[in-house]
Image: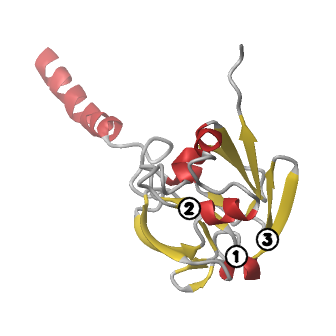
């Protein structure tokens, strides 16, 4: 009798055991995460460095040399194509140009990129400057050859991270700060 009861319990609990071993549909690292709601679109970006701020519109960004990146969006598990100017070219417009003289400044500067939804990320300026990094960071204004309406019109995209956690949708502000060592 005990053997029959134990066998019945095992058979009854087996589906629960299998379900507990299956990957959770909530949280964790799923193959495809749901798309976030769209962010408010940005029509221009403010770029600030050493007390100087410039504003660049989508049209002005389109007039800069364009780079096309083919990236894998790990959040959606899709390959995507974005086009826009290199972030380094935009930083040059505010006076941060790569040269032998500015190398220490570039190595000791950071950049905070903020979106229209107030999401912000941090980059070292060296990692966005082609003379220091093999990755590319662009300010995307086009996605798959069309205006980037899904990403908030202006979007910061990079090829260096395994996941797009530092992509900024609806990019509105770039603030560059230089850091000096304490003595």
**Earlier residue among tags 3 and 1:** 3
The spot of residue 75 in percent (x, y) is 48, 56
Which residue in the structure is indicated by mark 2? 157
Give me the disc on residue 61: 1
One can see residue 1 in this view: no
Label 2 near label 1: C-beta < 8 Å?
A: no
Q: Residues within 10 Å of mark 2 (few under 14, many from 20)?
A: many
- Closer to the camera in the image, 132 or 104: 104
Snapshot colouring: secondary structure
**Cα–Cα span, label 3 and label 1:** 6 Å
- Closer to the camera in the image, 167 or 74: 167
The spot of residue 76 in percent (x, y) is 46, 62
- SS at badge 1: helix
- Closer to the camera in the image, 180 or 118: 180
**Cα–Cα span, label 1 and label 2:** 14 Å
Label 1 near label 3: C-beta < 8 Å?
A: yes
Q: Residues within 10 Å of mark 1 (few under 14, many from 20)?
A: many
Q: Which residue corresponds to the image point at 48% horizontal and 60% vertical from the top-left?
A: 136
Residue 137, by quadrant, is bottom right
Q: Is residue 148 above or below residue 183?
A: below
Which residue in the structure is indicated by mark 3? 56
- SS at badge 2: strand
Q: Which residue corresponds to the image point at 71% horizontal and 17% vertical from the top-left?
A: 182
**Earlier residue among tags 2 and 3:** 3
Give the mark toward the camera: 2 or 3: 3
Q: Which residue corresponds to the image point at 86% horizontal and 54% vertical from the top-left?
A: 52
The spot of residue 124 in percent (x, y) is 59, 42
**Earlier residue among tags 1 and 2:** 1
Q: Is residue 153 left or right of residue 126?
A: right
Give me the disc on residue 155: none
């Amino acid at each position: 009798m005990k053997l029959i009861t134990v066998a019945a319990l095992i058979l009854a609990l087996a589906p629960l055991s299998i379900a507990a071993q299956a990957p959770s549909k909530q949280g964790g690292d799923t193959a495809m995460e749901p798309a976030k709601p769209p962010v408010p679109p940005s029509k221009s970006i403010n770029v600030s460095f050493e007390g100087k701020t410039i504003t660049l519109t989508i049209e002005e960004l389109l007039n800069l040399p364009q780079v096309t990146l083919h990236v894998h969006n790990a959040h959606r598990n899709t390959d995507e194509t974005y086009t826009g100017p290199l972030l380094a070219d935009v930083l040059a417009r505010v006076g941060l140009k790569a040269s032998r003289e500015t190398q220490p400044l570039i190595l000791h500067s950071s950049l905070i990129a903020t979106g229209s939804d107030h999401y912000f990320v941090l980059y070292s300026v060296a990692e966005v400057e082609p003379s220091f990094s093999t990755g590319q960071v662009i300010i995307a204004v086009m996605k798959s050859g069309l205006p980037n309406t899904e990403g908030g019109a202006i979007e910061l995209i990079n090829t260096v991270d395994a996941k797009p956690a530092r992509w900024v949708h609806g990019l509105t502000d770039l603030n560059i700060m230089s850091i000096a060592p304490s003595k």
